[in-house]
Amino acid sequence: MKPFADLFPVLVFFLTYFSANTWPEAARRIADAWLVTLVQGGAIRNDLVSILLASAAAILVITAQITIKLCLRRRIGPMQWLTFVIFVLFGGATIYFQDDTFIKWKPTVLYWSFAAGLIVAERFAHKNLMRSVIEPAGVSMPEPLWRKLNFAWAIFFLFVGGLNLFVAFHLSRDVWVSFKSFGLTGLTFAFAIGQSFFLAKHMASDEPEGGAS
């Protein structure tokens, strides 16, 4: 359930965007009723109605998720807080300034923040964040392999952050929304699956590496 909950705001963003494009008149009425007081100048541009509604819907969903967890006194991890703050800041800026540049930069800022966190934590705090997440699941590896794994994820996050910018500013907005919603998620999932095959070789065991002779 947790992976679905994490992806729910992304799914809402996608569905709201393309629903607004499918029914533009209804989308315009909703935007004028709910968003017009939030935008600079007090008038919403026709070509931005769908992206503004999508941003607003996603912000509402992720805010509701955080609020529910707080009310239930469930732990909210640093990555969840970071995702929430960046989503609200960049989505809010998109709505207020009526400029989709902000929301297009949002995934890149998030991924690059993840990469920076992995690198900075290891270099300056001597803490391998990937190890702290994965090792409790029963994975045992030598320190050099943990460093390589941490570095691999940092490079991956840097790569997909850059890829997002290429798609966002060189292809159409419709293509970018689809890529943001499913392409980036798919790439992350595929990379994690690839890592899982590597990690499976290092599940904790009482036997020494290589097994008994």
Image (spheres, grey):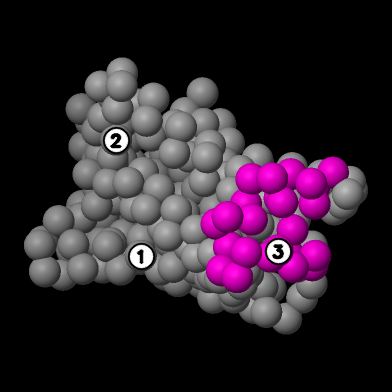
Residue 81's disc number: none
Distance from disc 3 to disc 2, alpha carbons, whole Å, reads 35 Å
Disc 1 residue crowd, few under 14, some 14–19, many 20+, Cα 10 Å: many
- Residue 207, relative to residue 170: is it above or below? above
- Residue 19, relative to residue 111: is it above or below? above
Marks 3 & 2, CB-CB < 8 Å contact: no
**Left or right position of 55 against 175:** left
Q: Quadrant of residue 95?
A: bottom right
The answer to which of 126 and 53 lies nearer the viewer is: 53
- Residue 40 location (% of width, % of height): 56, 68
Q: What's the amino acid at mark 2?
A: Ile
Distance from disc 1 to disc 2, alpha carbons, whole Å, reads 17 Å
Q: Is residue 70 magenta?
A: no
Report which residue position mark 3 lands on.
Answer: 44
Tell me the SS state at disc 3: loop
Disc nearer the start of the sequence (3/2): 3
Q: Residue at 25% across / 22% down in the picture?
A: 73
- Residue 189, relative to residue 92: is it above or below? above
- Residue 5 location (% of width, % of height): 51, 31
Query: Residue furthest toward the left?
Result: 125
Q: Which residues fall within the magenta stretch?
A: 26-49
